[in-house]
Image (cartoon, helix red, strand yellow):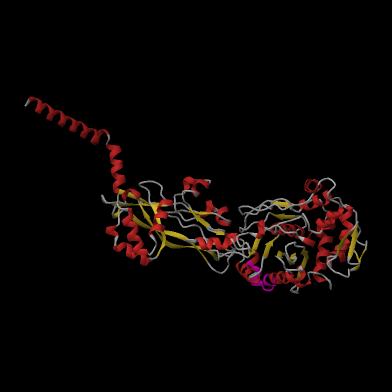
């Protein structure tokens, strides 16, 4: 009896000590655990900021969708859960399990099971809620597009954060699995401003993880929506150019050289803006990446093209500034120029006859420039090109861009060896052919510098954004003025190659240059670069049509439609130029 009584007393003492330890000494620790079991914290997603055109019209919006999640530690029978959800939604159980594994973060953290559920699907799930354990759903703001314009290469798209993607993010602590993050275009560049701040609310749950109601012990924190992004894009202009380039491969760019704002940004072919919204099937992905027209390629910033005769103004300015040509000097163009054992031809088969610098630019005479460019070394000519931004990034507010190539003597030596190239290469590259390649966005900066006579802001896509200036200081005002007058002759001269770009609006002065760039893979590329001045307003235009033939025939009429839209009515001018 004594031994039995002693054992009982020891056991009771042990229980009392343990009871004391739990209730007093470890109270804070276990009360927190109990609270976690009783209270479920549910994040509230912040709506991303809207993307607007320059006049406040919505381009990219949000719409509510529903996401189904499961808490692993509360899912008693996962197979049963997946089967019931599959019966309610029509989604295969293998897809549900794959999503669950993809977004798994831990035993007590919700893992995404299905997305974009309809109200009908949710209703069926609610009917079986008592048979489901650890299953919840939340409202989620998905991206939706206005449909008026496409512009996927500019707008970009968002991507869902998963186990693999979160490792690539600059601030992974800001995201949880299933969040949206800007992955291309403006969505990526302005991610911090667009994403907003998450909120949170608290639900009471029972021992089986079933929700009882909203907790009254803790106050909810409401999400803070992301900031709206007002772009410099003019919606009617973007819409018109997208239609004009439909079915073509090419680029259309319009900007305000005074501010550096881009009013239209069209790269064709493209892909649907909502392609990566919701679920992208494997078949859709394979189809788009195997498309030979490369719709995923942003031709504006990453397309590398020979600029053709559009570079003749640089050659002319370098010759004028170095006093190696006079305005009155003439050359006879018979249609062919022979250097060594090689013939270099003019685009006009029978030649232009006697031409001076003014006529050579207006009619884009190759022979004239073949003669005169030899008065420059390849490095002198390359340096003039670099001053206009060729061979380096423009610095536009998009994620990345290509640099292009401006051949120098050292570049040519590496390519062909010290004795493997000759003056013939200079003749070729000076007309924007051969090794010289540039991006359309570089061509836009080039024409902006010509329009503003050497001083223009860095190109950008956000309205009223302050940027640094790009300056070219090595040419006199007289040279700038003279080149502008020559470019005006391209438009108004009877045989000017750019005359099809003139909408003949009273008071509108247009200066431009066409280009026909040889293409080893097919028909020539068609260029038009130019600008229009009306009173105090200036607009620059770059049009490139791949395999389009002559720039004056194919690209100039598209530029005319731009000038006509922007300068034919006061209402459109207000939309385009109001700051």
Magenta segment includes 570: yes
Query: What's the magenta bit mostly, secondary-structure-wise?
Result: helix
- Count the marks: how many? 0
Q: Quadrant of the N terminus?
A: top left
Q: Residue at x 84, y 54 (%)?
A: 426
Residue 385, percent from left and from top: 78, 53
Above/below status of 503 relative to 100: below
Residue 456, percent from left and from top: 72, 55
Residue 25 left/right relative to 278: left
Q: Quadrant of the C terminus?
A: bottom right
Judge whether residue 496 can be spotted in this image.
yes
- Pick the residue in front: 285 or 140: 285
- Pick the residue in front: 185 or 477: 185
Residue 270, percent from left and from top: 60, 64
* Residue placed furthest toward the left: 1
- Pick the residue in front: 444 or 469: 444
* Residue placed furthest toward the top: 2
Judge whether residue 530 can be spotted in this image.
no
Above/below status of 390 relative to 251: above
């Amino acid at each position: 009896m004594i031994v039995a009584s002693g054992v009982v007393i020891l056991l009771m003492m042990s229980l009392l000590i343990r009871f004391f330890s739990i209730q007093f000494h470890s109270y804070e620790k276990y009360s927190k655990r109990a609270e976690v079991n009783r209270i479920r914290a549910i994040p509230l997603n912040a709506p991303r900021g809207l993307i607007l055109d320059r006049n406040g019209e919505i381009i990219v919006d949000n719409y509510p969708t529903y996401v189904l999640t499961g808490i692993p530690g509360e899912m008693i029978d996962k197979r049963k859960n997946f089967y019931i959800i599959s019966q309610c939604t029509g989604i295969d159980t293998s897809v549900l399990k794959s999503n669950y594994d993809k977004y798994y973060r831990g035993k007590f953290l919700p893992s995404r099971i299905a997305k974009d559920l309809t109200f009908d699907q949710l209703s069926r799930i609610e009917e079986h809620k008592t048979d489901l354990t650890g299953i919840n759903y939340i409202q989620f703001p998905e991206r939706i597009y206005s449909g008026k314009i496409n512009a996927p290469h500019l707008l970009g798209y968002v991507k869902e954060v998963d186990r693999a993607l979160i490792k690539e993010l600059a601030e992974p602590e800001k995201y949880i699995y299933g969040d949206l993050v800007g992955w291309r275009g403006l969505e990526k560049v302005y991610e911090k401003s667009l994403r907003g701040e998450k909120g949170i609310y608290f639900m009471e749950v029972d021992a089986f993880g079933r929700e009882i109601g909203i907790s009254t012990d803790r106050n909810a924190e409401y999400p803070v929506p992301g900031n709206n992004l007002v772009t410099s894009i003019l919606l009617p202009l973007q819409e018109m150019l997208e239609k004009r380039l439909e079915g073509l491969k090419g680029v259309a760019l319009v900007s305000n050289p005074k501010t550096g704002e881009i009013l239209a940004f069209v790269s064709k072919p493209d892909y649907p803006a909502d392609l990566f919204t919701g679920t992208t099937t494997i078949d859709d992905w394979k189809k788009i990446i195997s498309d030979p027209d490369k719709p995923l390629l942003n031709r504006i910033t990453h397309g590398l093209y020979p600029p053709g005769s559009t570079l003749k103004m640089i050659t002319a300015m370098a010759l004028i500034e170095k006093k190696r040509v006079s305005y009155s000097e003439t050359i006879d163009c018979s249609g062919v120029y022979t250097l060594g054992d090689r013939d270099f031809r003019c685009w006009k088969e029978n030649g232009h006859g006697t031409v001076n610098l003014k006529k050579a630019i207006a009619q884009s005479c190759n022979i004239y420039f073949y003669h005169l460019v030899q008065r420059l070394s390849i490095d002198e000519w390359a340096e003039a090109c670099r001053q206009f931004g060729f061979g380096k990034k423009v610095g536009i507010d998009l994620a990345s861009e290509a640099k292009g190539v401006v051949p120098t003597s050292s570049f040519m030596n590496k390519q062909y060896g010290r004795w493997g190239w000759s003056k013939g290469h200079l003749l070729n590259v000076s007309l924007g052919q051969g090794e010289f390649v540039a991006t359309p966005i570089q061509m836009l900066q080039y024409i902006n510098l010509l329009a503003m006579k050497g001083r223009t802001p860095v190109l950008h896509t956000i309205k009223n954004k302050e940027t640094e200036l790009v300056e070219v200081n090595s040419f006199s005002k007289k040279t700038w003025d003279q080149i502008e007058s020559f470019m005006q002759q391209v438009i108004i001269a009877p045989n000017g190659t750019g005359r099809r770009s003139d909408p003949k609006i009273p008071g509108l002065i247009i200066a431009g240059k066409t280009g026909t760039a040889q293409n080893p893979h097919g028909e020539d590329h068609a260029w038009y670069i130019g600008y229009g001045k009306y009173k105090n307003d200036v607009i620059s235009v770059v049009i490139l049509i791949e395999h389009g033939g002559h720039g004056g025939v194919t690209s100039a009429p598209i530029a005319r439609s731009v000038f006509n839209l922007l300068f034919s009515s006061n209402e459109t001018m207000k939309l385009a130029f109001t700051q």
